[in-house]
Amino acid sequence: MQSIEAAKAGAAIIHLHARDPSDGRPTPDPDIYSQFVPVIAAATDAVINITTGGSTRMTMAERLAYPLQAKPEMCSLNMGSMNFSIHGVAKRISTWRYDWEKDYLEGMEDRVFRNTFREINEILQELGSHGTRFEFECYDVGHLYNLAYFADQGLVKPPFFIQSIFGILGGLGPDPENLTLMRMTADRLFGRDAYQFSVLGAGRHQLPFVTMGAIMGGNVRVGLEDSIYIAKGVKAKTSAEQVKKIRGILEALSLEIATPADAREMLGLKGSSKVQF
């Protein structure tokens, strides 16, 4: 299983979505999550991070169905509603494997990923009551201010895990100036000791952009969810292949690779013994 391979390659946190095994369709079904999450948890000490996003076509109840059942150490949480879309990809595909794929991609042009202030509040309280902490996914500078708002309300407490995301249509572009802006804004809002900064670069920007983030003192996220490439024009075979490559780059820069135990300490997580996989 690729997640286990990625953990062996050095990934401290494994971020998971579920797909219907019959046709690859995104699904929130707890029964499908239950087929693979316990296997990953038994085979590795990596932190299991379950999405609360999943799809623009899922209801909030569907998106939270498995996280509320599993009570993981960590869940991802988009910090605002946005026009999240990859509909342009459909123009580059001539052959579709499954019937649902073309409509799904093209339909993103007219859909909004919804996370209102009330919905974020509910997620923080419902999952937070079980000790789950969050990967705060910030696609724009305003999302950092949204996080600061919830911190002011006392609904989230440091250390914050801020995942700054670049290169998704509807969010910040993959420009070095934007990376600097996000880092400086997070410093101003929270103070550097109150948060862990991480960088996600979508598509072909993945490896160079996360490397820049690491040089700036941040953590990095790679994987096939964010990019299917390992080099220019070369598709990656697995997420583990991408983990190995970025690990080699970071070690060549004399940067330290965090273990799962390090990640738990840095992020104040409750520990793998307190989940219900």
Image (spheres, rainbow, N blue to C red):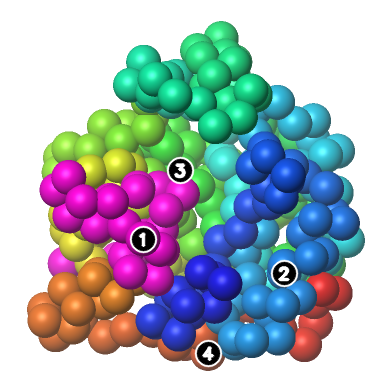
Q: Earlier in the sequence, mark 4 or mark 2?
A: 2
The image quadrant that residue 121 belongs to is: top right
Q: Nearer the viewer, mark 4 or mark 3?
A: 4
> Where does the image place residue 255, in percent across and percent down from the top left?
20, 82
Q: Which mark is residue 138?
A: 3
Q: Which mark is residue 237?
A: 1
Q: Earlier in the sequence, mark 4 or mark 1?
A: 1
Q: Which mark is residue 37?
A: 2
Q: CA distance from mark 3 to mark 2?
A: 25 Å
- Location of the C terminus by quadrant is bottom right
Provide the residue span drawn in magenta.
215-242
Q: Which mark is residue 261?
A: 4
Say whether residue 49 is left or right of residue 272.
left
Q: Is residue 209 visible?
A: no
- Between 221 and 95, which is closer to the camera in this rendering? 95
* Residue drawn at point x = 17 percent, y = 37 percent: 175
